[in-house]
Image (tube, rainbow, N blue to C red):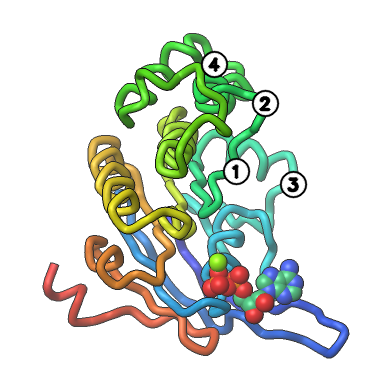
Amino acid sequence: MIELKDLGMSYALESGKLTVLKDVDVFIGDGETVAIVGPSGSGKTTLLLLLAGLELPQVGDIKLNGTNLADLTPDDLADLRRDNLGIIFQSFHLVPSLTALGNATLPLEIAGKDNAKQRAAELLEKVGLGERMDHYPSQLSGGEQQRVAIARALVHAPKLVLADEPTGNLDVNTGAKIIELLFNLNADAGSTLVLVTHDEEIAKRCQRVLRLHQGKLIEDESHALSN
Ligand code: ADP
Ligand code: MG
């Protein structure tokens, strides 16, 4: 499903080139749950942006389901994201002028799907927000906002879910509930999950743990064997 080959990524700065990723090689199969772990600034978000086709690497290939992202036009990339990707950010990124239901419905509306409201309402029920559908983001707690963001990311049943520190802005208890929810929904849907985190406990719940260290991505062997 996901194939990264000899991937290298750097940002151009006035002071020179900042290399964030180098020689990254990894294959992630359909339905796998994979944690990307690393300290702040190690390139976790950069890697997710590359997977989402929101940044392009200077070196190497990113293939999703056999398609090299470098071969796609911006429109093709937007279609691919709309149809196949669900992205959850640390800071929720909800549209403030839309209710919980409006936010969760958005991806289906953009895709022009029928029964968008109904499907979004079902998902909001699943994430425990059946009673909060008409609330605006400012009227929801952090944990509730992240649950709306999860509903929005999953509403179109994406094959690949990318989550960037989804509990980073939540207290420990709320975060644990969100993670539980994310893993349960993902298992139900059988989608592939790539979860960025610096929390070892959360990482351990994934089938595989990949660590970013000085630009390289290295898999935990012991973890892979213990699962
Ligand atoms: P993480 O998510 O692991 O904290 P990031 O991928 O956000 O790390 O960033 C990796 C490094 O790249 C950091 O040193 C950051 O300052 C730098 N960086 C991130 N985005 C940009 C950008 N658009 N331009 C220049 N440098 C960037
Ligand atoms: Mg980050």
Residue 144, how many percent across, how many down? 42, 36
Q: Does 203 sit left or right of 71 as displayed? A: left
Whether residue 44 is visible here, answered yes or no, is yes
Q: Secondary structure at mark 2?
A: loop
Residue 50, how many percent across, how many down? 60, 62
Q: Earlier in the sequence, mark 2 or mark 3?
A: 3
* Dot 1 alpha-carbon crowd within 10 angstroms: few under 14, some 14 to 19, many 20 or more: few
Q: Earlier in the sequence, mark 1 or mark 4?
A: 1
Classify mark 3 as within 8 Å of ligand 1 or not, answering yes or no.
Answer: no
Q: Is residue 193 above or below residue 207?
A: above
The residue indicated by pointer 4 is 113
The residue indicated by pointer 3 is 73
Between circles 1 and 2, the one closer to the viewer is 2
Q: Does 205 sit left or right of 112 as displayed? A: left
Cα distance between the residues tagged 1 and 2: 12 Å
Q: Earlier in the sequence, mark 4 or mark 3?
A: 3
How many numbered badges does the structure rendering display?
4
The residue indicated by pointer 2 is 97
Q: Which mark is residue 93?
A: 1
